[in-house]
Image: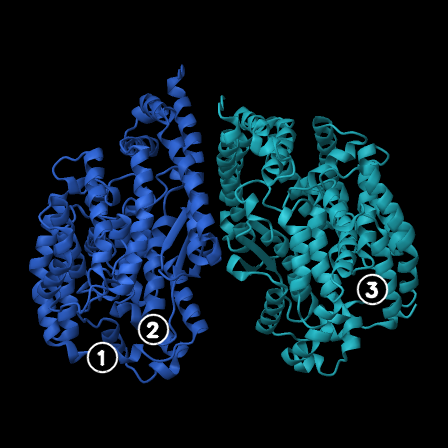
Chain colours: A blue, B cyan
Amino acid sequence: MDYSGKTMGEAFNALKTRLADYTHFQQAESLLSWDQETYMPPGAVVDRGEQLATLSKFSHELFVAPKTGRLLRDAAKEDVVAGNPDSDEAAIVRVTLRDYKKERKIPVDFVTELERARAQSHQAWVEARKASDFRHFEPWLTKMIDFARRYADLQGYKEHPYDALLDRFEPEMRTSHARKIFAQLRDGQAPLVKAISAKADAISDAPLHGHFPREKQIEFATRVSKQFGYDYNHGRMDFAAHPFETSFSARDVRITTRLYENFFNPMLFGTLHETGHALYEQGVSTAFAHTPLEHGVSLGIHESQSRMWENLVGRSHEFWEHFYPELQATFPEQFRPVSLDDFYRAINRVSPSFIRVEADEVTYNMHIMVRFELELDLIEGKLKVRDLPEAWNARYKEYLGITPPNDAVGVLQDTHWGIGLIGYFATYTLGNLASVQLFEQAEVDIPALRDNIRAGNFAPLLQWLRANIHQYGRKYSPDEIMRKATGKPLSAQPYLNYLKRKYSQIYGL
Amino acid sequence: MDYSGKTMGEAFNALKTRLADYTHFQQAESLLSWDQETYMPPGAVVDRGEQLATLSKFSHELFVAPKTGRLLRDAAKEDVVAGNPDSDEAAIVRVTLRDYKKERKIPVDFVTELERARAQSHQAWVEARKASDFRHFEPWLTKMIDFARRYADLQGYKEHPYDALLDRFEPEMRTSHARKIFAQLRDGQAPLVKAISAKADAISDAPLHGHFPREKQIEFATRVSKQFGYDYNHGRMDFAAHPFETSFSARDVRITTRLYENFFNPMLFGTLHETGHALYEQGVSTAFAHTPLEHGVSLGIHESQSRMWENLVGRSHEFWEHFYPELQATFPEQFRPVSLDDFYRAINRVSPSFIRVEADEVTYNMHIMVRFELELDLIEGKLKVRDLPEAWNARYKEYLGITPPNDAVGVLQDTHWGIGLIGYFATYTLGNLASVQLFEQAEVDIPALRDNIRAGNFAPLLQWLRANIHQYGRKYSPDEIMRKATGKPLSAQPYLNYLKRKYSQIYGL
């Protein structure tokens, strides 16, 4: 292609047009997936798979076509990009070129083979979990580990094959850095878990069990999410078996939740969690509209936002100083007899348990640590898949002091490995750690932050997050985001300090 | 392309693969449209337009590419097609080739120009209707009529440019045939409308106004639609401002409805109407899955199904002999004091009115006749757009005996013309007529049909429709469908006889 007037940004404009088509395809795919999890009739599941396969084939071909590469390289030379390396235009070229190079390294045969295996592997996992029979899943997990190793070889890596796996979900995160963080966490957190476990009976969560009528739960959770700043003119809430947030563009960001009438926590805290994800996506700058940059940068930074609104805000004493009277008015029979402090303790009760998704703030990272270490051992070949259940149980005993009674609530509990998601779990913990590191910086920058929360005023915090994180979309790497916002790389120390402070007070340690 | 083993159906198989991609695109587009009408946040409307534009551009390019034509022509020569012209395979090639030739005749520039104009024209119509100001819409309607004439010239036609417009919605219907049918209808129906109007006060619909709690309405309408045979494992019901049925494939057929707590009719009869459409789409043979034939053949035949279930079944005395006790139990305060016969008369009350979508069974076709005749005059140049409101009002006076007080409830009431749908309205009446012609044949073929309905057993009727209409999808033309099912071409006579019989009894004429 010849763009004679290079300074005019002709290549850049042609690139934008192409990326718009590509992102519109991806937005359509996301809507099909959203529908599948929310409203699609069960009998349409096979059709939906074929629709998604067609769309992803076309969007993939569009993206990895040599023309995309030429446009990227031509645009990179134009003044609009080359003349201003920190501009949004330069970011669009830089980040998309990174995606392009990564996608080009993976042959379409590999993708097809993996897709087919994933479907069968997922099915085998479903059956294995139902029967609590790891042997039924073992050959498929072996395949998935093998795919992960092959993927790392195709993609290439600097230090460790696991770098390539982490990079899918947490761009530029190195295994060595993650190891350091997890080691710091293990040393700091294990004593806290032990100390709290010794006083496990000090707190009761009985007030959270009872009868919470459906409509009132929906009304209350929606009200709080709006007050956080979630814009329902560009969003909506629906129900799904496994709650999630999905964003087609910053103008259409949807969350899902689930509700039990006999247990208070899942609906409210689930909604606040997904609202945190949604606020991130709604805050991306319009400069990145119709480009692949119009999303959060990584799973870890995304989780930092969801956990911040769920835990640092939603489980804080200040938050409930504001909202508890409203909550008592909403569920008077249930909460009038319960003091604010008893309620605050109940929602922050710590209890080591087998199931990750039900874990509290303190023990959650221990569940992740088990998975992170086992993944590394599997990828390095130190651990054989057939020995995995034993290794799993040994680590649960070591980190949480409990031994799963069977593999269904042990090594088979999560869907991730069965569909080839290796390198994913670590981002949950990276997100937890980032949430505190970022929040502490926000406290420094907004001296009245806790008073704001006590007054039900969340705008200052949201503005700080918009300015330091949301607006950038995928412009900066997670590491750049952390350094720009907090002046430091990601560390476990703020999180450890936070846990000790909060839970020493709650448990009187 | 060289398919050396022509008898092997290699070209046919390659064609099927290509059509699968094409239909999956269309299914995705339909889901995006469904979402837009049901759940999409309002702030996403511009994005949705761009997503749809991208998908339809790619699917259009895929379909009209020369490769599609080559595959169609090569497949037509293979034994699997050429050896069995009445086979489903031959139909797939024949019908798709017809579509292909039609789409190839319309230059992409024309499509783009029309799309852009439509958006503005629709906006002008919205504003004009709001202000009841036809002059504001006039220039846009003039453009739309011009587009329609140009479309007819591009597409070509045998006898009349309007043939090409009708053909978009009612394949192979000729203007001359439609004219004959409408003339027959006008002569037969006008006296009936007059006779009933003279006794307008004989029937009250007061029992249908009152208080009908939302959940009970939903429950009752859902129950009836299930009993008709609508399979909710491959379907679902949602709410929309303008109810519709949409089908992605026969495995995912969705309806929408609307509900007023103070008026009984819209929810129940609207649901039965859309259920009729849905039953058609759910009944298409799996032989046409992943091809463009997996839909009803025309708007007219589609409307015959919706009107049959809504009116011939749902407003029949037999139907209510079965369901009225259930209805009384559902809404006891409202219906316990009302006899079955009074209820039956109320839901069949005839009353000439200005608004088409609120019209009863008898006057409905008069609304369509006005539009059909005016469209013909506009396309033939006999009528100028600026004289349209006057012509509209004159015909309402002539056919319905009433004169609209303003253009908002007159010539501006429908959205169709503003978005370029000329030739569409006629299909509503063609569908009404077909519904009776088909139902009468079903009565001949199923002697116990009315007793079945009286017993709440709709399976025999559905089986008859499946066998004679649904399964064929787009395999046969509407005319072929009518001749195969009833032995005759479409005629107004059965409908006229039905109206006279039913309403002479109701109104004691």
Work out whether mark 1 precedes mark 2 in sequence or the reverse, and give the earlier one.
Answer: 1
Q: Mark 2 points at which residue?
A: A264
* Rendered image quadrant of residue A459: bottom left
What chain is tagged by disc 1?
A: A
Answer few, some or many: residues within 10 Å of disc 1's Cα (few below 14, many 20 plus, some between 14 and 19).
some
| Residue A29 on image: x %, y % | 43, 44
Which quarter shows the C terminus of chain B?
Answer: bottom right
| Residue A292 on image: x %, y % | 36, 38
Q: In the depicted view, which residue is nearer to us: B295 or A350? A: B295
**As drawn, is A324 to the left or to the right of B32?**
left
Mark 1 in CB contact with mark 3 (< 8 angstroms): no
The residue type indicated by label 2 comes to Phe
What chain is tagged by disc 2?
A: A
Residue found at x 81% / y 59%: B353
The residue type indicated by label 1 comes to Ser
Instruction: Give the label on residue A237, or none.
Output: none
Q: Name the residue under label 1.
A: A204
CA separation in Å, label 1 and label 3: 67 Å
Mark 1 in CB contact with mark 2 (< 8 angstroms): no
**As drawn, is A25 to the left or to the right of A140?**
right
Say which element carries label 1: loop
CA separation in Å, label 2 and label 3: 54 Å
Q: In this view, does A375 lie above or below B476?
A: below
Q: Can residue B205 be seen in this view?
A: no
Residue found at x 37% / y 24%: A71
**As drawn, is A269 to the left or to the right of B463?**
left
